[in-house]
Image: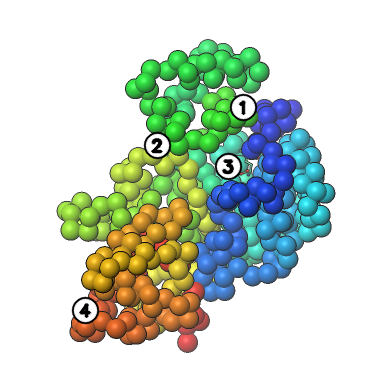
Amino acid sequence: MDKVQAQYERWIYPEPVEDLEAWIAGGAISAGDARECGDIFWPATGYREGMNILVAGCGANQAARYALKHPTAKVTGIDLSEASLAHEEKLKTKHGLDNLTLHRMRLEEISKLGQAFDFIASSGVLHHLPDPVAGLKALAGVLDRDGVIYIMLYGRYGRTPVYMMQDLFRRLHMGQTEDDVALVKETIRLLPPEHPLRPYETRSTDMKFDSGLVDLFLHQQDRPYSVPEIMEFTRDGGLTFQAWVQPAFYNPDVAIPENHPLYQRMEQLPDEERWAAMELFGGILSRHDFCVCRPDRPRDSYNIDFTDPGFAGRAVPLSQGGTLASAAAGRPAILSSPRRPPMTLPPPLATIFQQIDGARTIAQCLESAPLNAPPEIIQQHGMRFFRTLSRTGHVAFRLKETS
Ligand SMILES: C[S@@+](CC[C@H](N)C(=O)[O-])C[C@H]1O[C@@H](n2cnc3c(N)ncnc32)[C@H](O)[C@@H]1O
């Protein structure tokens, strides 16, 4: 049996959830969800009902979760691991998920299903393939022209302590037995307080259960990616990079004061260079969540381009769940939202933010803001503000068709 399959038969990942509804109600985070991220993935239309969705490398829960949360979608879950699929099957029965089909197969062979998909989710999978680019090409081959692939890959720098531990355990000839998992736990307990794994431990959920420990420290096939490696991977797969799911990590807008020379330097860089620089500046990204699409997808339908002079007139800002804490008159307000960095908004920017109603374009928001300033000043600062909101993930956009 393939070594990756053998691991996931014995140590199914993630921890099996027994009741998806209770789990979702408990606030479980599902990064890259088609509906929740619909505004990011499909700026022209948003999430559409009735999509054909593939969950490639679904593990124990993910395909069933998709089927439950996207009831009008037709969901296909595939995985190498019979044990993981058995749990997905159990969830299918428990929650009556008639829209879910499961197959045991390698994602590299997905064309055998003879289907095209509007959305493909592959999270935590491609970096375990013997040839990740071949896997990506296989997924690209079954993607609809307007479809989107959401991918999560391991981050190179944030996982440095994980690879140190993998190296240590390899040198100790440790395998994936119960005894060795117990020894992993003991080793971690004995690590010196200054060890680089210590801060990682506080951020990791995988260190809380045994199959997570195997996945982190005893895996026999995984590789991490830096931002430039993701760009190369996407191009090698014949696809186009579309967007980060959490753009705040890749832009200096909140992390570095705007009037600092470092910010100015970052701003001079082209997008991919700036994202790479910010990954190095932040230092702790242990995963990258992003989406890619086909190169023949009409660019007007998804490209967020503040340098395009027509952009303000056709982009409708959509707030991504942020709330503006009402501040005393004349004082800054705080914009906060789950999983996004809080922003302090001086009163004029708070006024502009309040114009966002899901119907007005950027240009209309700026026109309707009751501000006592010349229109060109409002325009200049307002455009900059919307770019920051976009770069921090506080707004996505609905793009109207170009006339
Ligand atoms: C780390 S788990 C992630 C599970 C799920 N995507 C999630 O995020 O909860 C990786 C899964 O990918 C599956 N897998 C690994 N290589 C695969 C391949 N070539 N084809 C299909 N599934 C694969 C494994 O069996 C395992 O269930």
Sequence-first tag of 4 and 1: 1
Q: Give the foreground label among 4 and 3.
A: 4
Q: CA distance from mark 1 to mark 3?
A: 17 Å
Q: Residue at x 81, y 57 (%)?
A: 98
Residue 29 drawn at (x, y percent) = 56, 49
Q: Is residue 240 left or right of residue 253?
A: right
Q: CA distance from mark 4 to mark 1?
A: 57 Å
Q: Answer yes or no: do the residues labelled 4 and 1 have beta carbons within 8 Å?
A: no
Q: CA distance from mark 4 to mark 3?
A: 45 Å
Sequence-first tag of 2 and 3: 3
Q: Which residue is mark 4?
A: 377
Q: Is residue 312 left or right of residue 148?
A: left
Q: Visible in this render: residue 144?
A: yes
Q: Answer yes or no: do the residues labelled 2 and 3 have beta carbons within 8 Å?
A: no
Q: Visible in this render: residue 384?
A: no
Which numbered tag is attached to residue 210?
A: 1
Residue 121 drawn at (x, y percent) = 62, 53
From what the image shows, is residue 148 above or below residue 302? above
Residue positioned most to the bottom: 403
Which numbered tag is attached to residue 124?
A: 3
Amino acid of disc 3: Gly
Q: CA distance from mark 2 to mark 1?
A: 24 Å
Q: Which residue is mark 2?
A: 157
Sequence-first tag of 4 and 2: 2
